[in-house]
């Protein structure tokens, strides 16, 4: 009896289903036609949900679809908005709009994790869960209402409030990429020396030294090699900024 009770307690009530529908409607600004797409977009793999063919039902496939649709909408907008922009310029600008940091901020602003169905405590998720759900939501909109509704949603939530061409042009996404491009142009030798930092913190840290022309120009440490390299690159960027703009 306890087993059956636990099963029925885990099923969403009519009230919960109604609340979820309202949440989606308020988030989108229009009524969804097929709520099941959105239910999948907010289902984590830990739930173990499957369709009638035994295929897993969780947000990851929708995340892939949403990422592609998002890229297409932003690319079309930039293509129309900046007729003088070449392929490289447009690619960089699109990367700035759809950066992981920006998507995480959007997902957080929309409070998407409040509707996430998971068996894992949410505090165990990294910050990228916000952006993942945002992309999955776009995928669900595409399947439910098509490209035009995705475009409308993205104009309302991303392009109109956040996309400013002039400010995007001056925005740096990767200090490391920017520095490497400049080092290669100026024929400077450089090396990122990364090693595990055995500090007293609970989580493992990595330290990095950035060598330029056989001299250490910046140091940093973080919880991943990538973060440590980017942190050191940012410090080096400000040290070289005057020379880079000459």
Image (cartoon, rainbow, N blue to C red):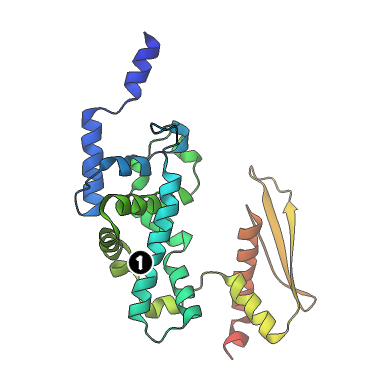
**Image quadrant in which the C terminus is located:** bottom right
Tell me if 153 is positioned left or right of 187 in this view. left
Mark 1 residue element: helix
Note whether 236 is above or below 123 in the view shown.
below
What residue occupies the far bottom of the structure in this picture?
246
Locate residue 75: give its quadrant: bottom left
Q: How many discs appear?
A: 1
What residue occupies the far front of the structure in this picture?
53
Q: Position of residue 159 (x, y in %)?
A: 32, 68
Tell me if 154 is positioned left or right of 212 in this view. left
How crowded pointer 1 is (Cα within 10 Å; few <14, some 14-19, many 20+) is rated as many
Mark 1 sits on what residue? 73
**Can residue 119 be seen in this snapshot?**
no
**Can residue 192 be seen in this snapshot?**
yes
**Image quadrant in which the N terminus is located:** top left
Note whether 14 is above or below 63 in the view shown.
above
At a point 42% along the width and 60% down the height, the residue shown is 68
What residue occupies the far right of the structure in this picture?
214
Q: Position of residue 183 (x, y in %)?
A: 68, 80
Q: Position of residue 164 (x, y in %)?
A: 35, 75
At a point 40% along the width and 13% down the height, the residue shown is 3
At a point 73% along the width and 82% down the height, the residue shown is 188
Q: Position of residue 204 (x, y in %)?
A: 67, 47
Note whether 66 is above or below 12 in the view shown.
below
Tell me if 56 is positioned left or right of 201 in this view. left
Question: Which of the pair 48/162 is nearer the observer?
Answer: 48
At a point 21% along the width and 29% down the height, the residue shown is 14
Note whether 45 is above or below 137 in the view shown.
above
Tell me if 45 is positioned left or right of 206 in this view. left
């Amino acid at each position: 009896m306890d087993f059956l009770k636990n099963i029925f307690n885990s099923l969403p009530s009519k009230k919960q289903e109604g609340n979820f529908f309202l949440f989606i409607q308020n988030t989108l600004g229009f009524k969804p036609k097929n709520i099941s797409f959105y239910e999948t977009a907010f289902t984590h793999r830990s739930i173990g949900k499957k369709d009638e063919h035994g295929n897993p039902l969780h947000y990851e496939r929708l995340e892939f679809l949403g990422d592609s649709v998002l890229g297409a909408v932003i690319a079309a907008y930039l293509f129309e908005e900046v007729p003088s922009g070449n392929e490289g310029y447009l690619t960089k600008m699109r990367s700035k709009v759809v950066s992981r940091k920006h998507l995480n901020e959007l997902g957080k602003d929309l409070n998407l994790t409040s509707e996430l169905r998971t068996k894992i405590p949410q505090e165990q998720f990294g910050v990228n869960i916000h952006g993942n759900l945002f992309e999955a939501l776009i995928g669900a909109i595409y399947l439910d209402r098509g490209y035009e509704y995705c475009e409308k949603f993205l104009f309302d939530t991303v392009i109109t409030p956040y996309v400013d061409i002039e400010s995007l042009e001056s925005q740096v996404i990767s200090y490391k990429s920017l520095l490497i491009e400049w080092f290669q142009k100026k024929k400077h030798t450089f090396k990122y020396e990364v090693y595990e930092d055995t500090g007293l913190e609970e989580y493992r840290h990595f330290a990095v030294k950035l060598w330029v022309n056989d001299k250490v120009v910046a140091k940093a440490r973080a919880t991943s090699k990538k973060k440590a390299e980017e942190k050191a690159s940012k410090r080096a960027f400000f040290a070289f900024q005057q020379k880079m703009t000459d």
